[in-house]
Image (cartoon, helix red, strand yellow):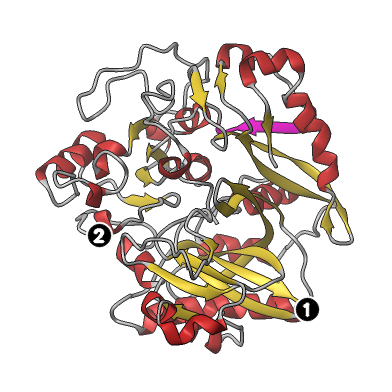
Amino acid sequence: MQPPDPKELKGRSPEAAGDRSKHESESIDGRQPSSRPRASVAAPPSPSSGDQVLLIGGSVRAAAESARRAGYAPVAVDGFGDRETLVACDAWHPIDAFCGGSGNPREREDAQTPGDTGGQDCFAKAVSPETPVIIGGGLVSGFRWLESCPRRFLTATPRQIRSLQSLPILRRIAHEAGARFPQTVSRTDAFAPSSSGRWGRWLTKNAVSCGGLGVRWHDHANPQPDRDGASYIQAYVSGRLVGASYLTDGERSLCLGTCRLLRTRIGDRPFVFAGAFGPIELPSDLQSRIEALGSAVVRQCRQDPKIGPIRGPFNIDLIVNQGRVTMLEVNARWSGSMELVERTWSESLDLPCSLFDPVDLWLERLRTYPKCSHDYTLKRICFARRRLRFDPSRFESLTVPNAHLTDTPGGPTSFDPGEPVATLITKVRRNRVGCDLRSVRPLRRRIATPELCQHFGNVGSR
């Protein structure tokens, strides 16, 4: 799963939200720079430190930090332009300039795509023609607008990402790996009068959405509109939601860690991604099935000429319940829990580890696989509980013991209830059911102390 896309949770444009997604320098679409004060952040490494790569996604901060550790010089295209993204990247550009206004080019007749002159100009002004592209996170409208992009992709292409959202392909992968796949029906079948008596706990899902934003409880009497033709109805499966992180070179698949995924309710969306903790240890039989799923994905892509071999990191979301593994979706791109896997490997080996590192390097690391530590790493997204305005100049004085706050805005920013404000990363104790989230409560209270509420507001991770 991926952190919520700004286009879906933000109630206004980035400009109206305090220019959170504006870099101080003029953007590539010719708009005037923001007048907000520049954040006091360290200068990023020189572009000469590695090969330049263009990262595109709703929020690419974690992927950019990973690419930097792998030796790349990242240039970011996302919807936030947070302080930590600017530190990790050589340059930042707003994604609206690339895909046309709202992040969904189909919503405007004049929207730019990479195949149009305007879209080509955006790419040409951002990076050189030889610079490859990486999908560095999810986007609520998907990446179909990028399928005509003539540039080279270092990881899975937008077309491959969409192909792995196909329900028949997902069923085939799950069957081959000995996993389950939830009962799924089309919207046409869902609204047939003869089927109205069989609905129990069902979900309406959107195949191209991300971060749980396209998942709602299915209401047969009042169905959600299917604006883009990508919705379907799927049976709800109870159990523990986990995300497995893989790396492939097109031939081999390595499962590098599995994390428990956390969710929260935002308005009428009850399954919004709220973070993760891990990596977790699983019984050997479950671990074998999860590894088999990764191999099945790679094999399916290699054997299907319409997809072709995928390379780089990918993620599979699963439900684990009483020894059963149910596959929900495959995300052939960077995903939200991957930075926890990288952090654990980096701390255990005392080396900078990245899922953009070569497979052969990871195979060498696997030969000396470290024992899991006594604590998990927790990533928790903090959402605004009420309307607030964030002042980063006062935020500089905030210190949270044994924790790290990231994804923070670089300028004064207004937030509506339910909007993501920042991400808390810390260590949490293990217990018999996974991890002790109660240890995070003092940190949440520290963030929302009375003196900080004046500029930070009432913030919680729900």
Q: Which callout, 2 or 1, points to the residue nearer the camera?
A: 1
Residue 242: quadrant of the picture: bottom right
Furthest-right residue in this view? 432
The label number, if any, that marks residue 147 in the structure image: 2
Relative to 24, does residue 64 appear above or below in the rendering? below
Q: Residue at x 55, y 57 (%)?
A: 1
Tell me the kind of residue under disc 1: Gln
**Left or right of residue 134, residue 119 in this image:** left
- Disc 1, SS: loop
Relative to 382, does residue 160 appear above or below in the rendering? below
Residue 312: quadrant of the picture: bottom left
Residue 431: x %, y % from top left: 89, 56
- Report the residue marked by disc 1: 322
| Magenta-colored stretch includes residue 404 | yes
**Could you tell me if residue 127 is visible in this image?**
no
Tell me the kind of residue under disc 2: Glu
Instruction: Report the magenta residues as a range.
Output: 401-407
Q: Between disc 2 and disc 1, whose residue precedes?
A: 2
Along the line of sight, the residue nearer the viewer: 96 or 429: 96
Are the residues tagged 2 and 1 within 8 Å (C-beta)? Answer: no
| Magenta-colored stretch includes residue 272 | no
What crowding class fits label 1: few (fewer than 14 Cα within 10 Å), some (14-19), or many (20 or more)?
few
Along the line of sight, the residue nearer the viewer: 321 or 434: 321
Q: Residue at x 52, y 74 (%)?
A: 234
Relative to 462, does residue 44 appear above or below in the rendering? above
Q: Residue at x 45, y 68 (%)?
A: 249
